[in-house]
Amino acid sequence: MLTKSLSTRFAVVVTSFAVLSSAVFVGAQDAAATREPFADIYTKLSPSVVAIAVEKQTTVRDALPGMNAPQQPQIERGLGSGFVLSKDGYILTNDHVVEGETKLEVDFNDGTLARAHVVGTDPDADIAVIQVENIPAEKLIPVTFADSDDLYIGQTVLAIGSPFGERWTLTSGIISGRDRIIQGLTNYSIGGVVQTDAAINPGNSGGPLLNLNGEVVGINAQIASESGSNSGIGFAIPSNLAQRAAQDLIDKGFVEYSYLGISGSDVTLDAMEALNIPNDTRGVMVQTVQAGSPADRAQLQAAQTKDANDPNSTLTSADIITAINDHELYGMADLISYLASNTKPGDKASLTVLRDGKDTVKIEVTLIPRPHTAQS
């Protein structure tokens, strides 16, 4: 099947060559103009990107079915990516790259190898900071970050990493979506995630997603795939969230996020019709309110239906949060992102709430540290 596919593609290329031969010179110039910036960025940034070899000790039960044998130690090895944050040797990567590590080895593209230790991890945002040992400062070339809030769909981006162990691989694509939600390593979701069609595969995790200025706009973290390899949808933790988490990990060894105490959803057409509100209404419809939470103390109201036991029952009332601190919300992903990147525990936040489709009210809440639950 593979041979047939490759042969077919070859025939298409040969056939097309005759048709397009008169435009070869112009096409070559255009291709060169596209390639050179990519090459310059790769040359500049590849010394900042590292491969991270990880060893983890696990146990397996060495026995036939039905036998009660002791567990045996086993070493698992993996490979991820990361990039240099500072001359102090701090390196940013994904938490899932180093989770459970017993040994870390960092490989620089000039052949330098170094041991490293974990400084801190943030499983909620799948972020980790490690620090390399015994590396001269002149070998450490920190990246620069861009404001991920300025990204736009269609923007060209590049990824550098070690997909399938092929170290310092460069791939290119565009920002194909914004404000996505992905699952972190805890019950919490990560909001404001960047979607790209640049090829992201196992081993790219923790590596940088770059704009054409060579600035980091995200940390490559996940793919949407049924096969385990790239299918045109990759996800990166936005740079603004990554920087905030990294600084807290370096300063304190942990990250504390603010907590509102709701579960919510985007506003559906059914909800718009039931509440008789415009069909372009955007915001977060409050589904549940956690007892004792800031939302509960501020008397936010959960959505109610005619029959609480029937999920398809008609909606009768709901609070829709349309803005936080005058920042308009388009949906749940926007609220999650704003809370994580723009607020800290102890902050006061002003919520603009459309209540039951009739009244717009301002509600002030005092945010608290995020507990270990699945709410926002």
Image: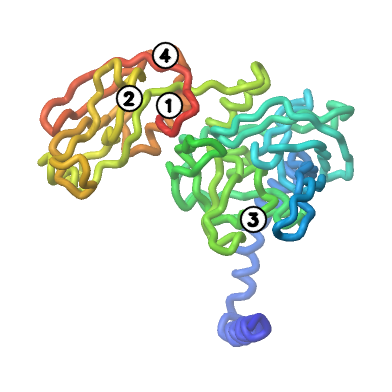
In space, the residues marked 1 and 4 are separated at their CA atoms by 10 Å
Amino acid marked by disc 2: Ile
Q: Secondary structure at mark 1?
A: helix
| Contact check, label 3 and label 4, Cβ < 8 Å | no
Pointer 3 or 1: first along the chain: 3
Query: Does residue 354 lie above or below 16 as drawn?
Result: above
Q: Which mark is residue 347?
A: 4
Q: Residue at x 66, y 53 (%)?
A: 202
- How crowded pointer 4 is (Cα within 10 Å; few <14, some 14-19, many 20+) is rated as few
For the residue pair 106 and 211, the one nearer the viewer reads as 106
For the residue pair 68 and 104, the one nearer the viewer reads as 68
Pointer 1 or 4: first along the chain: 1
Amino acid marked by disc 4: Asp
Amino acid marked by disc 3: Asn
| Contact check, label 1 and label 2, Cβ < 8 Å | yes
In space, the residues marked 4 and 2 are separated at their CA atoms by 12 Å
Percent across and percent down for residue 278 are 14, 42
Pointer 4 or 2: first along the chain: 2
The residue where tag 1 is placed is 339
Pointer 1 or 2: first along the chain: 2
The answer to whether residue 371 is left or right of residue 251 is left
Q: Which mark is residue 324?
A: 2
Percent across and percent down for residue 126 are 59, 37
In space, the residues marked 3 and 4 are separated at their CA atoms by 38 Å
The residue where tag 3 is placed is 201
In space, the residues marked 1 and 2 are separated at their CA atoms by 9 Å
In space, the residues marked 3 and 1 are separated at their CA atoms by 29 Å
